[in-house]
Image: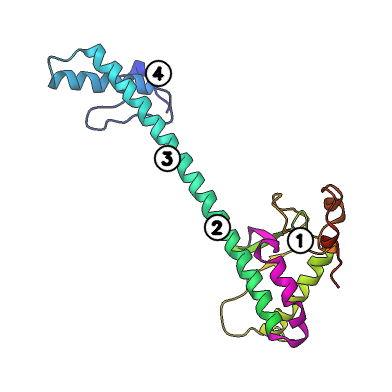
Amino acid sequence: MNFDPRRGPCCTVENFTVEILGTPKSAWNVSATKVFARDFVAHHPNSQYDAVKKAFSTHLRSLKRAFKQAGLDEAASNARHKEDRRKERKRSLYHRRLDIARTVSDLRSHISMLTRIGPDGMSSDETANENNVPQYRILARHWRSLEVTAWLRIFDAIYRHNRYGPAGTGSRGNNARMRFESMSMGHPQRAVRRLPRNAYRADWAAQRPTSKPSHLRHYT
């Protein structure tokens, strides 16, 4: 706060205020400490003015720590909620693709591979806004091959066709999320294990320990 102690106390007992973002020794807080100590001694004559100032300074430090921790806790909580929402979108994407595979007879042979990849093999995303319309930037899996990505996009294309039709007219229900491609990679996470060789990026697989032969079959 912009405060000049030469102009008098920073506040009065009636409008008592501390600078919670400032240090205990800031000009404002030093003045506020004096205001508190004078009023306290006035109501408790047996108290020592300097002792009250020291006690209040200690209390102010505790308030600052609690305020900082509350901010950290809120940030951590927001981060957890954001990650939970992201995981839920991945699960929804997985089940949407699985439902399409079960619905379209030509795709039913792919159900087994979809279930092996599972929700953890789905691409993640991060939120973005365009003209106040929420969109989701796709974050590619650092281990998953482009071949698998193209294969999964087939399920998405059929889903859009079945839902919106050739003319692009929507069916009943909530609008689908707007996901768009990006060059961004998601944070490195554990790859889904025991998938066919061509499910993994070649550069990623080259850095892994030699896989067992049973893990190296191609999926076609």
The mark lying in front, picked from 1 and 2, is 1
Cα–Cα span, label 1 and label 4: 61 Å
Comes first in the chain, label 3 or label 1: 3
The residue to which callout 3 is attached is: 70
Left or right: where does residue 124 sit relative to residue 204?
left
Asked which secondary structure carries label 3, the reply is helix
Rendered image: mark on residue 25: 4
Q: Earlier in the sequence, mark 1 or mark 4?
A: 4
Residues under numbered marks 3 and 1 in contact, where contact means CB atoms less than 8 Å apart: no
Whether residues under marks 1 and 4 lie with C-beta atoms below 8 angstroms apart, the answer is no
Marks 2 and 3 in Cβ contact (< 8 Å) = no
The quarter in which the C terminus is drawn is: bottom right
Vertical side of 176 occupied by 31: above or below: above
Q: Is residue 30 above or below residue 97?
A: above
The span shown in magenta is 103-129
Amino acid, disc 4: Lys
Disc 4 vs disc 3: Cβ atoms closer than 8 Å? no
Residue type marked 2: Asp
Q: Earlier in the sequence, mark 2 or mark 4?
A: 4
Q: Quadrant of residue 176?
A: bottom right
Q: Is residue 211 magenta?
A: no
Distance CA(mark 2)–CA(mark 4): 41 Å
Q: Which residue is mark 2?
A: 84
Mark 1 highlights which residue? 194
**How much space separates mark 2 and mark 3, taking CA atoms?**
21 Å
Compare residues 183 and 7 and report the one nearer the observer.
Answer: 183
| Residue 127 position in % (x across, y down) | 62, 58
